[in-house]
Amino acid sequence: MLRGVGLEVAEPVPTRILHPVDLDIESATAVAVVGPSGAGKTTLASLIGALQQPTEGSYRFDGQEVAGMSGARLAEFRARDVGFVFQHSHLIDERSVVANVDLGLVGSELHRVERAELCAAALEWVGLATLGARRSAFLSGGERHRVAIARALVKSPRLILADEPTAALDQETGREILELLANATARGATVILVTHDPRAVEYVDAVHRIVDGRLTGGGHS
Amino acid sequence: MTWRLRVESVRRLAADAAASLLLRPGHTIGMVAGIALGVAGVVGIVVIADTQQIQVDRQFDLQRSDRVVVRAWTPTKAGFDATRVAAAEQLEPVLDVGEFSVWSRARTVSRTDGTARSSRPVLVADGSGLLATDTRVVRGRSGDSLSTARGPVAWIGERLARDLGLAPGDDLDNAQVLVGDLPFEVVGIIANDEGFGYASSGVLISRKTAVATLGGVGENVRVIAHVRPGSASAVGDNMVAGLDPYRELMLEDVTPPDGKVLLSNVGSDLRRIGAALGGFMGLIGMITVANTLMMAVYQRRRELGLRSAMGWKRRRIGVLVLTESATAGIVASTLGVGLGLGVAVIWSHVQHWELILAPWLPFAAIGSGLTASLVGGIIPAYLAASTPPMTAMRS
Ligand SMILES: Nc1ncnc2c1ncn2[C@@H]1O[C@H](COP(=O)(O)OP(=O)(O)OP(=O)(O)O)[C@@H](O)[C@H]1O
Ligand SMILES: [Mg+2]
């Protein structure tokens, strides 16, 4: 639940990136944030994902106030509650698929064996059960995105944020990825898809449109 | 967190650090090489210095065993009984024996106009004492005249002569020095490079002159005998009893003498050079580590940003980079110790020396290498920890 959340930056010249927005998102639903390039979609997503702090407004996540948290508390919040899927899969090429998925288990105090089980389950969920030992550099683009989704899901976060997850993929693979992400709601996660991709609306419960740093409306699809 | 999870967390950090190092072999090798060469340099030089020192000491032991030094703890103005000293000279293994005392450890010595002042030892010896210590009269009156010299005449050491501005070859005819404020006529120049080096920088006068001009009974009054190798201890016992049958002078055999200290100083100088050189190379290693890690951190901005976005705290990211530098530091120092020891072993073998290794040296070397790489890692670790989590989203 965002109330009057906005962002203004001082560098290099004082600029308003995001005008105060109000936004409520039901938990365990999938929503899309759409809009033209430069509108402020990534910025909004970064505020929701607590990668940076808004300069004004209030952001409550499941009753907990996130705006105003210290850097360390924000990191804890991200570690526990937010899984990210970026436009590029950001895998560490030289390491195995499992090692990359394991990176997602930050801060969880688990034994090696439990971690291995969680990673295997996440890989199975994205359909890559057999590829765990492979070096990430050898994966196809679609497989890399699946691994990135497994990495985001492995800790069972309450929020999954995907910024342009399909931009670098072909039609067919893009669909598979959108479907995987939307299905994460079945695991209890709230999914926010930031995208240009018009197909995204088919997979989500609500669409929010943003233009020039302003939320111009949205609705249920 | 239970200890098991704590161990698990440290293990993951180490595995992460090791993986990062192995993924960039070029960087890692450059970083390791800097520290390794520094550590190898120190270890090699210190081990060779120590080994060499022992060889010097051993050689000196051999030499030392042919010099007997007997010290009087309660000297008198009269000094040693000439006939008893002459009797000691009759002992078969004795080549030369005579007085070679330090009358005063430090006196102000200067030119007659008061310039070139410095603090110098004043020695008292007789002709046989000069022979027994291999003190040479390089110019001027021979040492035999010490037994008859009464007036204010002095022999001065070669180095002192140079410091006072008496160039070699200068006419000694009118040369004079002030000892304290007493003028002495310089009648000869002496030198010693047999372990009694202070003779080369001091002032030598006869016992009679010393008693008449400086007064006192002398600070370190000794008879020194040059003897056949191996007989030192027997001659020492004999001299203590023979020179002072009534225990007036409280004689004691104090062999080994002063020379040992002198040579030990040479050895520790060598070690100091080793340490200084090592410190310098360690500094270079540290800069290499800082530079390499800085480049690595820059190249890894995306990965570090990703870790940060996924909820790694600043501190853990910093610790990750420090763990990498520590791991590289330990590997490098271990290699360096091996390399340095290897060089020292080969060197000693070629020289037919027995290797001397201080047991703490490898640990100290690894500790220093680790410290250098950790210090070098501080700034890169700070930079890494400062990677904003947005980096992942925008790259
Ligand atoms: N920290 C910042 N400092 C200055 N300008 C910024 C900053 N962050 C974002 N902007 C600007 O704000 C605007 C919105 O950026 P944002 O990345 O949110 O757009 P977007 O909707 O995600 O665009 P795209 O679809 O191209 O990814 C852009 O003009 C961008 O240059
Ligand atoms: Mg964007």
Image (tube, coloured by chain):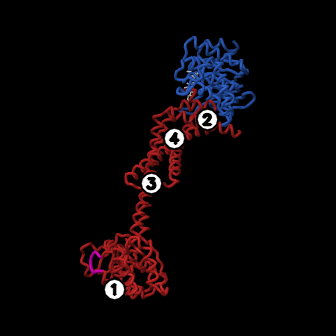
Chain colours: A blue, B red
- What amino acid is found at the position of numbered circle 1 in the picture? Ser
- The residue that label 2 is drawn on is B12
Q: Is residue B236 left or right of residue B187?
A: right
- Give the mark, 3 or 2, whose residue is nearer the N terminus: 2
Residue B208 image point, x, y percent: 37, 87
Mark 2 residue's CB less than 8 Å from ligand 2: no
Rate crowding at label 3 as few (under 14), some (14 to 19) or many (20 or more) other CA atoms within 10 Å.
many
Q: Which residue is mark 3?
A: B355
Type of amino acid under label 4: Ala
The answer to whether the residue bearing label 3 lies less than 8 angstroms from the nearest atom of ligand 1 is no
Q: Quadrant of residue A154?
A: top right
Q: Same chain for the residues at labels 2 and 1, yes or no?
A: yes
Q: Position of residue A63 (x, y in %)?
A: 75, 29
Q: Amino acid at mark 3?
A: Leu
The image quarter in which residue B159 lies: bottom left
Name the element at disc 2. Answer: helix
Q: Are marks 3 and 4 on the same chain?
A: yes
Mark positioned earlier in the residue sequence (3 or 4):
4
Please check the rendered image and state whether residue B249 is part of the magenta-colored stretch, yes or no: no
Residue density around tag 4, few if under 14, some if 14–19, many if 20 or more, within 10 Å = many
Question: Label 2: chain?
Answer: B
The alpha-carbon separation of the residues under discs 3 and 2 comes to: 41 Å
Q: Which residues are magenta?
A: B137-142
Lower sequence index among marks 2 and 1: 2
Looking at numbered disc 2 in the image, what kind of residue is underneath it?
Arg
Which badge, 2 or 4, is on the more N-terminal residue? Answer: 2
Q: Secondary structure at mark 3?
A: loop
Q: What subunit carries mark 4? A: B
